[in-house]
Each structure stands twice: as structure tokens, then as C-alpha cells.
Image (cartoon, rainbow, N blue to C red):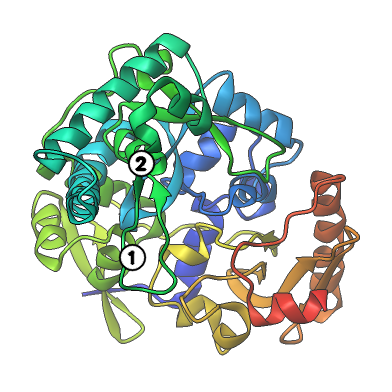
């Protein structure tokens, strides 16, 4: 069995995730392809992840890719998480993840509507009819917010209490539910937000305005295999458990996808990992590098087993739900954290000694990141211990 040590895994991470200075690029879509998808639960993450991997790109370049060139698309996919993906990956994400998610969401929301007794007849059929009416309204409007659509489709204002026996639950309109279903089905897409690049208040547009004819349809098994292939190229080698965690699929689905690929097992410092059979040649070790990655960046969120790059720093940098805060990387390892204070100042703290040369590189990167922020303030959606300490 071929052995791949942690040093080689870190070299692959630096090169393939465009973190080393020599492999940064201002091609926005190429950054996304390098990571398969960009984590987008926190809208600011998309922009800051690209900024960390580019040389001269600005938030305006990212917005152009998203909303004018439309080479990137925002959608719910793996683990019911929000991502920004290259548009050509949409058929793969749709068949491998989103279709099943759409069915799950429709079952859940139909059950809430039925339990509330707010409609006559079959709740699922009624909900599907509202979805169709909403889609037609959006086709007519071209683009709209949820509030604007609810004026065109009165049934969107139907009030449902999803958990009436719970003190924290209260009646809510079904507008968001319908838009979520239409979104994960690939019938509508999230457009430009109402506000800065930190906003998550999006307008919606029919997918036909972005992709004439919609996304191509491919079999789910083929889509899962292709998604795993792309993940292994970017994140491999890694244990099968990491693939299962990242995709959110069952172990059986992961193993079936792997049977369609030419993969080999490799030794990972005592554990066993999976790698594409044509990807065994080592990556070159890049020159010393540092990077400031934002909260929920796709690199640290790409693996469930993290000791090889995280070391003993998990408790300071992750919250209790496994969300990472802003992190400082040096040669493929996390060595500290950083944060933006309410006055805009960027501050950092090292959790281990990296030497004067690396510290100087970190401070230069901090200054570069401050320029990217400009006047924008972006507090992470999920606060972590070190980030809270730095902003106290």
C-alpha cells in the first residue's frame, strides 16, 4: 500500500486549494472549481474565501461572476448547506443531492400544513399547486423578493405553526418553505442580495433566466460518482468517513459511488485513505506560505478528520456544532486565528510560535485582507471562542 504522509497532504492542500502564493488566481470561477464548491452559509465567506486565494480580485469581481456573468450559482446541496458552485456543476449537485433534499423538504412541510388543518384536501397536492403558481408568478416578474411574490400569490401568506405544542414555535407564512422547495428543485435561483456582500436577503429569479432550458438531467448514481471524483481530486487522499461526512450521504451511497471510480487505498500515517488511482504522484512542496481563511472556509470544512492540519487548536477555533471561525494557516497547518472588530480593525492571535518570517507574512496578509473588507463589517454567523476573545 502506498503511504502518503501529512507533509504531502499539506502540499496538496496548498497547491490544489490555491493557498500558496504561486497558485493564487484572479479567475473567480477557477477558485470555486479548485474547492469543488464554496461554503456559503455565511454570505461573507464566499467573498473572503476568494479574496484569500486571489491577487488583485475585489468583491466587485465576485459579484460580477455571481450576478452578471452568472458563472457561479448559489444553492442548497450537501448536508442541506448553502454553497456557491460553478454553473456547470449544477446537474451533478442537483441529481446527487438536491433532488433528494427537495423531496425531504416537501414531505416535512406538507406534514406541517396537514397537521395545522389550514387547507382542504391533500396538503401535498395543495403545496405543489402553490409552488407552480409561485414559479409562474416569478416567470412573469423576472425577479422578486419573497415579500413581492407573496403579494402576487396570496396563498404564500398562509400561516402555519410547525410545532404548536412547543413554547418557542409560532405561526409563520409558508413563503420561505415554497421558495426553498423551488430552489432545491432547481426551478428558481437566488439572485443579487438586497444590501452589501454580507447580506443574505436575496431576490429570486427563475432558473430559465440563468440557464435557458434549466440544468441537464443526469442519473443520480452517475452524479454521485462524479461529485466524489471531484472531491477526491481536491481533498484526497482521505478516509471514506470524510467523504460520507462532506456529502451527507449514507455509507452505502458513498461505497456505491466509489465502485464507479478507479481508486486505490493509501496509508495515511497509520490510517487508511482513498485516492484516485491516477493521482498518486506527489505534489511539489511550495515555498513557505501563510493564509487568512474566513469562518466556514471550504478548506477546513472539507474534512471531518482534522488532526493532521488542526493539531490541538480545535477547541479555540470551532464552535460546539463543528463550525470553524477565522483561521491562520502556515504551510498547511492552522497556527492561530483572526477577527474583525466592530471598528473594522483586523486582529490576530498565534496559538504557536511560527518564527519572525512567518509572522511578518501573516501581518502582510492581514493588511491585504483589510483592503478587501474596505468599510464592510462582517461578524461571522457562528461565533467561536477565539473570535469572541479577539473582539471582546
Q: Residue at x 34, y 11 (%)?
A: 212
Check disc 2 and report its element: helix, strand or loop.
helix
Question: Which element type, helix, strand or loop, lies under badge 1?
Answer: loop
Within 10 angstroms of label 2, few (less than 14), some, or many (20 or more) residues? many
Q: Is residue 170 above or below residue 305?
A: above
- Name the residue that disc number 1 marks: 237
**How dense is the environment of label 1, judged by Cα within 10 Å: few (below 14), some, or many (20 and up)?**
many
Q: How many marks?
A: 2
Q: Which residue is nearer to you in this view: 106 or 59? A: 106
Label 1 vs label 2, nearer the camera: 2
Q: Is residue 338 left or right of residue 333?
A: right
Q: What residue is drawn where x is 12% and y is 34%?
A: 125
Q: Nearer the viewer, residue 128 or 332?
A: 128
Q: Which mark is residue 180?
A: 2
Q: Measuring from the top left, give residue 32's x and y in whole percent.
A: 50, 41
Residue placed most toward the observer, 184 or 371: 184
Is 320 situated above or below 247?
below
Where is residue 157? Give x, y as percent: 40, 36
Residue 311 appears left or right of 133: right
From this view, report whether residue 71 is shown above or below residue 92.
above
- Tell me where residue 265 sits by quadrant: bottom left
In the image, residue 42 lies at what x, y percent?
A: 57, 54
Q: Say which label, 1 or 2, has the lower sequence index.
A: 2
Q: Residue at x 17, y 34 (%)?
A: 126
Q: Quadrant of the C terminus?
A: bottom right
Would you say residue 90 is visible in this rendering?
yes
* Picture residue at 20% right of the left edge, 60% below the top: 249
Residue 247 percent coordinates (x, y): 28, 58
Amino acid at each position: 500500500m502506498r503511504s502518503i504522509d501529512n507533509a504531502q497532504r499539506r502540499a496538496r492542500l496548498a497547491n490544489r486549494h490555491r493557498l500558496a502564493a504561486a497558485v493564487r488566481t484572479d479567475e473567480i470561477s477557477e477558485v470555486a472549481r479548485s474547492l469543488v464548491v464554496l461554503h456559503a452559509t455565511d454570505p461573507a465567506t464566499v467573498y473572503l474565501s476568494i479574496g484569500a486565494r486571489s491577487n488583485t480580485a475585489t468583491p466587485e469581481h465576485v459579484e460580477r461572476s455571481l450576478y452578471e456573468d452568472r458563472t457561479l450559482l448559489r444553492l442548497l446541496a450537501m448536508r442541506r448547506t448553502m454553497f456557491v458552485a460553478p454553473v456547470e456543476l449544477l446537474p451533478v449537485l442537483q441529481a446527487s443531492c438536491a433532488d433528494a433534499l427537495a423531496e425531504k423538504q416537501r414531505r416535512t412541510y406538507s406534514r406541517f400544513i396537514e397537521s395545522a388543518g389550514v387547507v382542504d384536501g391533500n396538503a401535498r397536492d395543495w403545496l405543489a399547486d402553490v409552488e407552480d403558481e409561485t414559479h409562474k408568478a416569478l416567470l412573469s416578474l423576472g425577479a422578486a423578493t419573497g415579500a413581492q411574490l407573496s403579494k402576487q400569490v396570496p396563498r404564500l401568506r398562509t400561516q402555519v405553526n410547525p410545532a404548536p405544542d412547543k413554547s418557542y414555535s409560532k405561526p409563520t407564512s409558508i413563503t420561505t418553505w415554497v421558495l426553498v422547495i423551488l430552489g432545491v428543485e432547481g426551478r428558481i435561483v437566488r439572485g443579487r442580495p438586497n444590501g452589501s456582500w454580507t447580506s443574505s436577503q436575496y431576490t429570486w429569479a427563475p432558473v430559465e433566466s440563468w440557464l435557458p432550458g434549466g440544468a441537464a438531467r443526469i442519473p443520480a448514481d452517475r452524479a454521485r460518482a462524479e461529485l466524489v471524483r471531484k472531491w477526491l481530486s481536491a481533498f484526497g487522499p482521505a478516509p471514506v468517513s470524510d467523504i460520507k461526512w462532506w456529502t451527507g450521504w449514507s455509507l452505502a451511497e458513498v461505497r456505491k459511488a466509489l465502485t464507479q471510480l478507479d481508486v486505490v487505498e493509501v496509508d495515511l500515517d497509520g490510517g487508511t485513505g482513498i485516492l484516485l488511482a491516477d493521482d498518486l504522484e506527489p505534489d511539489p512542496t511550495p515555498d513557505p506560505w501563510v493564509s487568512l481563511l474566513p469562518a466556514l472556509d471550504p478548506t477546513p470544512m472539507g474534512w471531518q478528520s482534522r488532526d493532521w492540519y488542526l493539531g490541538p487548536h480545535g477547541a479555540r477555533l470551532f464552535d460546539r456544532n463543528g463550525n470553524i471561525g477565522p483561521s491562520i494557516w502556515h504551510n498547511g497547518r492552522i497556527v492561530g486565528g483572526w477577527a474583525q472588530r466592530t471598528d473594522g480593525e483586523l486582529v490576530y492571535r498565534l496559538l504557536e510560535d511560527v518564527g519572525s518570517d512567518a509572522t511578518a507574512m501573516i501581518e502582510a496578509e492581514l493588511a491585504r485582507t483589510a483592503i478587501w473588507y474596505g468599510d464592510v463589517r462582517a461578524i461571522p454567523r457562528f461565533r467561536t471562542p477565539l473570535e469572541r476573545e479577539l473582539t471582546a
